[in-house]
Image (spheres, grey):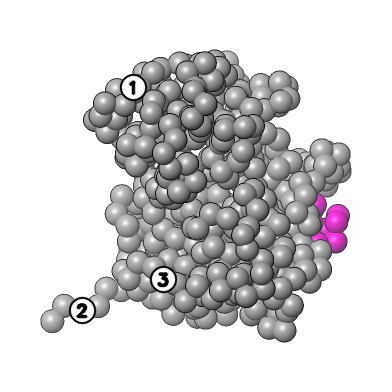
Amino acid sequence: MDAEPNFPYYNTVDQIYHAEWSTAKLVRLELLRESIRTLWPKGHPTKLIHVAGTGGKGSTCRFLEAGFGALGKSGAFMSPHLFDYRERFSVDGQFVSQDDVDEVWQRRVQPHCVRLALHNPHHVHTFHEVSILIALALFELHGVEWAAMETGVGGRYDQTRALDVVATLLTNVGSDHAHLLGRVQWQRVLDKAGIARAGVPFFTTDTDPQDQKIIAAVCQNVGAPLTRVGEPEVCALEEHLRQMHLTPLPEESLLNAAYQKWNAALSLAVLKLFHPGLDERAVLERLIAARLPGRFWRIEEDIYADIAHNIEKMRALVGEVETKFAGRGKLLIIGLSGQRVPAEVFAALAPIAKALIVTGASYKGQDPAAVRNAIESVAGDTPVLVISDPRQALQVAKSMRTPQDIILLTGSTYMIEQVLNPDPYLRYLSATFGWRTRQDNEATGTVQLTLPKPSTTLR
């Protein structure tokens, strides 16, 4: 009889096989831990909740922030941002001000980073690490009692793993970032489940039986109490909404999407753990009021945007589009970033489209003509246009639209930002992210004196 798979051991072997890589990643985590200890020697005052997963991380963070807001001051650290860097930091459901970001960077975080690098030039904090320190400084500034912290990519090696947290959440595990987390599913589950800490409650809504075995093995290995949130909890949430006469839900509510109820049920389970006597109606009202730009976002009459950018998010989006706009034509403006496979991401989208307009994305954007060629196999008879400039693509879609059509922008946060960001200066900064480092390296022929950077993106 074959022995049961030993998934924690497979992680150990993977680390040994890639010792140079894994050690460098763990050093980055320890470097950030040292910075946190230096800036908050008595420990950070905010109770932090760590959220990982392929889809639903940002929405779950928003639901956690909304729910804990019924019990005290709450916050969230999320990515990507859509228009403005400050959107990564939220307190009581509102993005922090630009002045707040300026203050904690100039007076707190940047001076520490400079001192750190003075002692060792290899110890230069990355964009993601700096953002985490800024989040913690903002939470302290505003007296935040509870805050949700979203991972960047993966879990085990993401810099958010350096945080001391009171709970960990894993929404689901899909195929996104396979080139970073592993080509096969069990590798990606191992990485994301790696957020588990000894004695820290672990919650998940992942329903795949094999995923659940791996998650359970990881939690058992480190001694993390595991709670699964599934269909019964989602159905109970829906029933409570009906019983309390809180339906129908507002169109712009995050909770209005069927898949978002899973994220809300996950958040509610965490809330009940820490506050078993909570006023459930008050919490549900706050969950209903939760909003997040870029999630099935109504821009203007019959024009919507959604930052779905991977296979799982796209399938969920298609389900919502078909439900809300059955019988209507759908003009879809799409862009793609990173190393995602166009035919896989847009396979579910193409059959519902009246026309596809492929356009560019400002950061790590794939060539629109190459995307068009790659999706021909799934587009069928659907017309596919290529318009490289995202703003022009929207104008063309408007000129093609009939009164029965809707327009939907999706596939890349960077593309949506370039179309809709009202601030031309922020739009330019986002489009040219990283140019200073590239220019320095090209001019000097040198490489930055930093340890290998973790795999994360601007958004």
Above or below for 26 versus 350: below
Asked if disc 2 and disc 1 are in contact, CB closer than 8 Å, the reply is: no
| Residue that badge 3 annotates | 215
Secondary structure state at the residue bearing disc 3: helix
**Residue 142, magenta (yes or no):** yes
Q: Nearer the viewer, residue 97 or 384?
A: 384
Q: Marks 2 and 3, Cα distance to the nearest angstrom? A: 18 Å
Q: Nearer the viewer, residue 57 or 11?
A: 57
| Residue that appears at 52% across and 16% down | 399
| Residue that badge 1 annotates | 383
Asked if disc 1 and disc 3 are in contact, CB closer than 8 Å, the reply is: no
**Magenta stretch bounds:** 137-147
Q: Nearer the viewer, residue 69 or 235?
A: 235
Q: Is residue 305 left or right of residue 69?
A: left
| Residue that appears at 47% across and 67% down | 205
Nearest to N terminus: mark 2 or mark 1: 2
Q: Nearer the viewer, mark 1 or mark 3?
A: 1
Secondary structure state at the residue bearing disc 1: loop
